[in-house]
Image: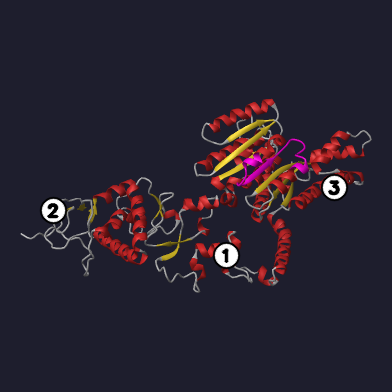
Amino acid sequence: MRGGTGGLHVERYRRWLLAGQSAAECVQARTAAPLHPALRRDDRAQAQDRRVVYLDGYAGEGRYENGDPGSAEIAMRVASYYRTRGLRLACYFVEQQPKSFERLQQVLRGYTGRGVDARAHRGEVDEVLDDVVRRAAGVPLFLFLDPCGLCLPRERLVDVLARQRRDRRPATEVLMNFSMMAVRRLGGHVRSPKGNERSLERFDAVCGGPWWRKYFADADDQEDAAEAVAAEYARRLHQLTGMFVQSVPVAKAPHWKAVYHLVFATRSPYGLWVFGDAAARARAEWWKTLELQAEQTDPNALFSTVSVLRPAPETVEKAAVPVMAANLERLGATNGIRAERVLAQSSWLESRQDYIERLAIVSGQSCETLLHAIPQLGQEHWPFLADRPDFSVDAPCRLCVARRTGSYSHFSRVSVWSSRFHDQVCLRHKIWTGRSAENYMQQVDVTDLPDVIQAQRRHYRLLRRHGHVVLSACFEHCSDLWDTVVRRGYRPSDRRRRLDTLGTSHPEIWDPRRYIAVYPEVVAAPRSTPPLTGGSSHAPRTADTSASGPSSSVSCHRNGSFAGAASRGSSRNWETPLYASRTP
């Protein structure tokens, strides 16, 4: 059983080496990690009922003997993680060997008890493939085929990819192991008078015909013939399915023959990019694994052989940059863009499309859908919103970014349009994103303050009832009023409770917690507080004055001193400072 999908770190690769796992397996696991359907943003967007189907056709035991997770357990860990975030990953595992299947079931029981949707079948993957495809109707499907020998017959694979799942959406993707050791072994049978015809016929079915035999019959170099067969297999799979197909050789050490090719098939250009990026990162981990293995073999060596064989970054860059430039020039020629403009640094290249069409390409949505969802796109002076002066570009909720992109590394590159008056709390994740939260590091979790969350809900109800023009003025007025109240020394008791919950007592003026603590009062104030006029009208009046202070269900104190008094014009109790002036 080889390493499967999922995010694996360098420390895990080290444990694999200690347990006797090969560097090639590390490359496979690392390459497969970002391709898991639950991790891919575009797959999540296509999922009906928040569900994705995953099939591991050669699951093995699910867990290595040293306790490290195999492909099946890694998939179930991912499923368990995303289950708490509303995405259900339906996992199907197939294993033929009785002992491996029994151990696989033990691993499954530990996760199904936690609510993970996982099922195991003992037998061949061909027996359950049609059933899994039917269960994946309307949702993304990811097939992971990692046999120790030969894979599924090509006609069977093409039937699924080109007939049963021929549409671009919902997504269908395949990552499989094309064994080069099997190709070389069977290639030897072609030229041998004692070749096993039954084995050759079985590989004929895998390749979709005996076409591969001529490569070995006429070749002087068996290794060149094997690589040619792998390349032709990928080309024919692309031709028959219409999918992007990429094949990457994986070897145990530099200058060694490839153990297998990782073959990835997708209809999404973004998926192809993810695979290329994952393969490049996996190669870096492959070199690290080899260097660690060399250090363990000869710990007293001044430097390892691997460090000498590994190409320097300067050498790689020198070889790669001309190829990248040629690709960009070809891309520019295809789209009618000058070569020097393509190679120049620019946030947007010259294009015949306007910004709505470019946004449609990036987002994968039609222009009509974008204009319906964001009418301001059709304005002449976009991105300035003449009809909503309260709107500005702000930092989004950090958990919303992670949920939509599948990563916590995109905060600095994502922004949203939001109202500086009305969008204070992300109700989905209970995160303060409003006043003074200028970036994701300043966002505060308000889960333990239900009155703040309820205030945002009430805020939205008022906004729907009265409109943004009226409510923006009200919110600005009440915010200034309560800011003046606090700066003049009055402290609502609920404010003190909220600050204690937030872990502070004297927040700075730039601290969002300063505004969180009085947000419920700001929202409640318009209900019973009359408009105040005059330069000092924002201050609450004491019991001997004639004007009423801000209506609130809380008590106020100043500098820790209290005295019972009532504010005229209001049925709610206030406490005035002991040293406040009073009329005798």
| Nearest-to-viewer mark from 3 and 2 | 2
Q: At label 3, which amino acid type do we have?
A: Asp
Q: x%, y% of residue 163? A: 72, 47
401 or 314: nearer the eye? 401
Amino acid marked by disc 1:
Cys
For mark 2, what is the residue? 565
Depth check: give the residue in front, 376 or 315. 376
Residue 3 in sight in this render: no
Q: Residue furthest left?
A: 584
> Could you say which disc has been placed on residue 367 in the image?
1
Task: Identify the residue at image location x=69%, y=38%.
Answer: 129
Mark 2 surroundings within 10 Å by alpha-carbon count, few (fewer than 14), some (14 through 19), many (20 or more): some
Residues under numbered marks 3 and 2 in contact, where contact means CB atoms less than 8 Å apart: no
Left of 511 or right of it: where is 223?
A: right
- Pick the residue in front: 125 or 520: 125
Instruction: Look at 36% across and 53% down and name the residue there.
Output: 457
N-terminal of the pair, mark 2 or mark 1, is 1
> Image check: 23 left or right of 478?
right
Task: Mark 1: give few (<14), some (14-19) or many (20+) Cα within 10 Å.
Answer: some
The part of the chain drawn in magenta is: 132-156
Q: Is residue 231 above or below residue 488?
A: above
Q: Is residue 152 magenta?
A: yes
Q: Secondary structure at mark 3?
A: helix
Q: Nearer the viewer, mark 2 or mark 1?
A: 1
| Amino acid at dot 2 | Ala
The span from disc 2 to disc 1 (Cα, nearest Å) is 62 Å
Q: CA distance from mark 1 to mark 3?
A: 49 Å
Q: Which residue is denoted by mark 3 in the rendering?
A: 224
Q: Name the quarter where the N terminus is drawn.
A: top right
From the top left corner, tell me how far across and down residue 183 is, in percent.
82, 40
